[in-house]
């Protein structure tokens, strides 16, 4: 499928919309406009859910979308972790662990892809859980700014601790899976 046709595919337009939302989300957080920030975060989540659903429903799975969707997801979460850390709402150590995991996975997968060693990088169940907890953690941080309540603050603190634990554990699992696949039958890799 030609590149421009891939860009015009509805799921990819939704992914581009998510990328377009990101700077406004950053601005609203830096301006302490948490109602708008939460609304934009929810809108970004809706575009993420819809792009995958529509790609299957409309049979518009594209190579561009295969790469662009996870990049948009990681860019959104990574940027939010940095901005919320800058705003003093997420501890630095959590953001460092999240970034270290993502950067390590990105470097390893790029190297393996570029050398032709391994081309299929499916997320593991633990990796998906890690992403889910990160999304819930960011949502909880933003909600805590909207409705400061003791139970929500405790939930936020707990989620951030789980994120700090899951990030290195899921990175180790990812490394273990990649090492196993690379050392297995070359046809399987």
Image: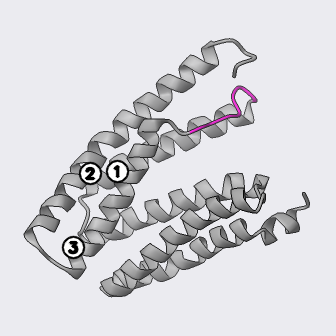
Q: Residue at 36%, 42% (x, y): give it.
A: 167
**Is residue 119 depicted above or below 21 in this figure?**
above
Locate residue 161 relative to residue 82 in the image: left or right. Answer: left
Residue linked to disc 1: 96
Q: Residue at 54%, 39% (x, y): give it.
A: 123
Q: Position of residue 42 (x, y in %)?
A: 44, 74
Give the Cα separation between the discs numbered 2 and 1. Answer: 5 Å
Q: Secondary structure at mark 2?
A: helix
- Dot 2, how many residues are within 10 Å of its Cα: few (below 14), some (14-19), or many (20+)? few
Give the Cα separation between the discs numbered 1 and 3. Answer: 22 Å
**Is residue 159 depicted above or below 120 in this figure?**
below
CB atoms at circles 1 and 3 under 8 Å apart? Answer: no
CB atoms at circles 2 and 1 under 8 Å apart? Answer: yes
Q: Of callouts 2 and 3, which one flags the residue occurring earlier in the amino acid sequence?
A: 2
Residue linked to disc 2: 93
Q: Position of residue 182 (x, y in %)?
A: 63, 19
Query: Does the magenta segment cover residue 121?
Result: yes
Tell me the quarter of the image containing the N terminus.
bottom right
Q: Which mark is residue 144?
A: 3
Q: How many marks?
A: 3
Between residue 166 and residue 78, name the one nearer to us.
166
Q: Residue at 56%, 43% (x, y): give it.
A: 106
Locate residue 122 relative to residue 78 in the image: left or right. Answer: right
Q: Residue furthest right?
A: 2
CB atoms at circles 2 and 3 under 8 Å apart? Answer: no
Q: Nearer the viewer, mark 2 or mark 3?
A: 3
């Amino acid at each position: 499928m030609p590149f421009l046709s891939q860009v015009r595919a509805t799921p990819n337009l939704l992914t581009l919309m998510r990328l377009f939302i990101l700077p406004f989300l950053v601005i609203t957080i830096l301006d302490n406009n948490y109602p708008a920030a939460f609304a934009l975060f929810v809108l970004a989540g809706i575009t993420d859910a819809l792009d995958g659903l529509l790609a299957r429903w409309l049979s518009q799975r594209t190579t561009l979308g295969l790469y662009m969707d996870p990049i948009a997801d990681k860019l959104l979460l990574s940027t939010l972790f940095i901005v919320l850390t800058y705003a003093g709402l997420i501890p630095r150590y959590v953001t460092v662990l999240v970034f270290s995991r993502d950067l390590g996975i990105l470097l390893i997968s790029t190297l393996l892809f570029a050398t032709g060693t391994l081309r299929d990088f499916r997320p593991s169940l633990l990796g998906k859980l890690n992403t889910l907890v990160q999304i819930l953690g960011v949502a909880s941080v933003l909600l805590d700014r909207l409705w400061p309540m003791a139970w929500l603050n405790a939930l936020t603190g707990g989620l951030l601790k789980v994120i700090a634990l899951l990030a290195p554990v899921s990175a180790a699992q990812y490394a273990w899976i990649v090492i196993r696949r690379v050392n297995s039958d070359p046809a399987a890799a």
